[in-house]
Amino acid sequence: MTPAVAFFNQKGGTAKTTSTLNVGAAMAEQGLRVLAFDLDPQASLTMALGIDVQSLPLSVYDLLVDEAVTLAEVAQPTRIPGFDLVPSHPDLAAAELELLSELERERKLSLKLQASQPLPYDVVLIDSPPALNILSINILVAADALVIPIEPHPLSLMVLRRLFETVNRVRRLNPRLEVLGFLPTKVHHSSRLAADMLATLREQFPDLPLLPPIPLSVKGAESVAEHSSILQYQPRSSLAAAYRQAAAEIARRVGSPSHV
């Protein structure tokens, strides 16, 4: 089965969307066939890829709430070769209430992925909302692995306990779920705060690896404004190089084909 990797952290501002976009673009550049899910009602990943949200015939909202809608109907190509997207829509915010009365509401995403096997992709990436809700639980039940983007800020450490409590509870529904590690983002390498936070992560979570860090750079925001990944916008930048390294390590850990 195609491995599904979620970029997951209930805290906002940790670069989940930017990381999903750029890791996916790096994997596609390296020869993998990538399918990304935008599970954030803000539809940031969808808009970052230049897709007009208002003109979408179907979105991930329809996939979750309508049993007749298939993954193949919703997935669409993007301007990045080898990188397809299941787009989001603001209607997804309503799914929280609509799914409450549904049977197996926490398995909607997992069931749709299972029904679509074998997928014509090497890896599935999932961009998560900045919340712990029914959408988040669907992600945790469907995913094989989690990458936790984390910025070098004290508040980032404070929310980790609740995140891992949720992950441990969901493992009763999804025992295969593993945490690949932390993806440090917005890292200023000369910052004492960043160094201290990374050291604290190593101390408090010695069994979880730190993935290659992503440097702080305005180029990431600039590339999103251009509806592009950093690999297309500035392919020789240190930011692009960092995402290539992170993508190769994530692909290696989930056992994707060794094109990377």
Image: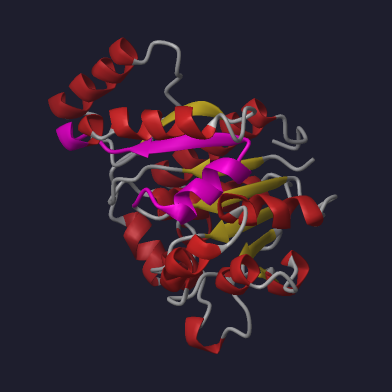
The spot of residue 95 in percent (x, y) is 48, 68
Q: Quadrant of the C terminus?
A: top right
Relative to 70, residue 165 above or below: above
Outermost residue on the bottom side: it is 55
**Between residues 125 and 194, which one lies in front from this camera angle?**
125
Q: Residue at horizontal 64%, vertical 34%?
A: 251
The spot of residue 100 in percent (x, y) is 48, 61
Relative to 83, residue 161 above or below: above
The spot of residue 22 in percent (x, y) is 50, 51
Relative to 136, residue 208 above or below: above
Is residue 44 inside the magenta stretch? no
Seen in the image, is 94 located left or right of residue 142? Answer: left
Q: Quadrant of the N terminus?
A: top right
On the question of residue 106 being in view, the answer is: yes
Q: Residue at horizontal 47%, vertical 46%?
A: 240
On the question of residue 235 being in view, the answer is: no
Seen in the image, is 67 located left or right of residue 140? Answer: right
Seen in the image, is 33 located left or right of residue 91? Answer: right
The number of numbered badges drawn on the structure is 0
Q: Residue at horizontal 43%, vertical 55%?
A: 17
The stretch of residues the image draws in magenta is 131-155
Is residue 142 inside the magenta stretch? yes
Indicate the quadrant where residue 97 lies.
bottom left
The spot of residue 40 in percent (x, y) is 44, 62
Q: Residue at horizontal 71%, vertical 69%?
A: 67
Seen in the image, is 40 located left or right of residue 75? Answer: left
**Between residues 51 and 127, which one lies in front from this camera angle?**
127
